Structures are given as C-alpha cells and as structure tokens.
C-alpha cells in the first residue's frame, strides 16, 4: 500500500465546482434492491442541469476529498493485462466513457457482487485535467505540464427517486501521484464498505 499526498488530492478537489470543473462526461446505473439494473444514463457533464451538476460533483468530491491514507488509500495494481478491470478502466478513459457496452459490463459485475437489500447508484465520471506547471517558488503558471485523464467511480445509496446519498465506496483511477497520472496505482475510498478492494482483489 502506497501513501497519498494530501496536496495532490486537494489540487483536484479545488477544481470540483460548477465553474471550474474539468469533468467531461458522466455515466451511471441505478440498481434495485434485488441487484438488477433499473435504469442507466450516459451524458456530457455540461448537459446536466445546475442541480444535477451539484449532486454529481458532491458524489465525486466525497471520494477524492475523504481522509487520505485512512478512508482513501492507495493500492498497487497487479498489471494492465488483457481482460483485466485495469485494461477496462484504461479503455473507458481513452474513449471518454463513450462505450456503453463496457459500462454495462462494469455495472453488471458490480451489481452481481454488491450487497443487496437497498437501492443504490453506480456513477462513473470522466475528467481531463491540464496539470499546470509549477515554478520553483511553487506558483502555478498557465502552461500545461501534463493532461491527466481519469475516472472517479462512486457508489451511493439512493435517498429517493434517483437522489444519491453520501457514497458508500468509490475509487480514483489512475492515481494522481506527484501531480501526475500513476497507472500503476489506484486510490480506493472505503466509506461504509470496503467493496472495491475485495472486488478488484487488491
């Protein structure tokens, strides 16, 4: 298990506001009490209403802004091998979530193993962050050092009709380490459940 730099996470979350967000697209599925997919969606983040943007930003920010190295922990992945979830996540990043078949496979895999008995939502958010160059005095410039393409997955109980509550669990892939994409690691958020660590066999 690696260590997460709190400043790296804060750099991402400071931009998770309606005016500054670098989210490009969001997809999701709503799962019923018996573990069946009730409905799905896939849309541009800009296409959401102001209220929907606020809810989705909150669901994502809760994952990344949680207490580092306790609630949010970093794990080394076994490798991006053919057929692995890591190859799958990489493909979703590269296509900007525009592959409904891949997303459906992920929803079904989660729903098959996730505890039943209550309705919940699986949200998958794609972001593209132009990481600004930092000068020797730690000030940021307008120049881009790297383009960080990433996914945030958030699993939330439903409080009402399609109304998400605080996430039970989630992840950030690839990890954002030393202000750079780190495809060898994933950050896993364990709020009330340690589901993703078991699901991904880490």
Image (cartoon, rainbow, N blue to C red):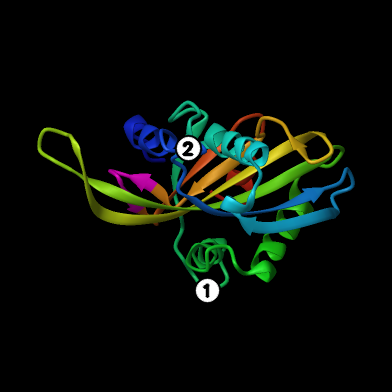
What residue did someone put label 1 on?
A: 82
Horizontal and vertical percent for residue 128?
A: 43, 54
Give whichever of 197, 63 is nearer the camera.
63
Give whichever of 122, 145 is nearer the camera.
145
State the residue lying farthest toward the right.
Answer: 34
State how far apart marks 1 and 2 are (Cα): 33 Å
Q: Residue at x 68, y 67 (%)?
A: 100
CA neighbours of label 1 inside 10 A, class few (<14), some (14 to 19), many (20+): few
Q: Which mark is residue 179?
A: none
Residue at disc 1, secondary structure: loop
Horizontal and vertical percent for residue 36?
A: 86, 54
Q: Is residue 197 magenta?
A: no
State the residue lying farthest toward the left.
Answer: 136
Residue at disc 2, secondary structure: loop
CA neighbours of label 2 inside 10 A, class few (<14), some (14 to 19), many (20+): some
Disc 1 or disc 2, which is closer to the eye?
A: 2
Q: Earlier in the sequence, mark 1 or mark 2?
A: 2
Q: Residue at x 56, y 32 (%)?
A: 62
Q: Compared with residue 3, is residue 105 higher up or lower down, i.e. above or below?
A: below
Horizontal and vertical percent for residue 155?
A: 67, 42
Q: Are marks 1 and 2 in contact (CB under 8 Å)?
A: no
Q: Please report the bounds of the magenta region as a residue range.
A: 176-181
> Is residue 166 found left or right of 149 in the rendered image?
right
Q: Give the quadrant of the N terminus.
A: top left
What residue did someone put label 2 on?
A: 16
Horizontal and vertical percent for residue 144?
A: 25, 53
> Is residue 136 found left or right of 22 in the rendered image?
left
């Amino acid at each position: 298990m690696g260590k997460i730099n709190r400043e790296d996470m804060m750099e991402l979350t400071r931009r998770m506001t309606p005016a500054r967000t670098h989210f490009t697209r969001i997809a999701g599925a709503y799962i019923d009490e018996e573990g069946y997919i009730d409905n799905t969606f896939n849309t541009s983040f800009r296409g959401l209403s102001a209220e929907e943007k606020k809810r989705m930003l909150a669901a994502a920010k809760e994952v990344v802004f949680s207490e580092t190295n306790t609630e949010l922990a970093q794990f080394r992945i076994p490798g991006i091998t053919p057929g692995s979830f890591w190859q799958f996540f990489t493909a979703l990043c590269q296509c900007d979530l525009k592959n409904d078949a891949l997303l459906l496979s992920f929803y079904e895999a989660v729903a098959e193993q996730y505890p039943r008995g209550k309705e919940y939502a699986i949200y998958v958010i794609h972001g593209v962050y132009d990481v600004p160059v930092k000068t020797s005095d730690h000030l940021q410039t307008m120049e881009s050092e790297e383009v960080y393409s990433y996914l945030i997955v958030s699993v939330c109980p439903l409080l009402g009709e399609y109304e998400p509550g605080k996430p039970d669990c989630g992840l950030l892939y690839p990890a954002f380490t030393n202000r750079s994409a780190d495809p060898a690691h994933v950050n896993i958020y364990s709020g009330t459940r340690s589901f993703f660590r078991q699901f991904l066999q880490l």
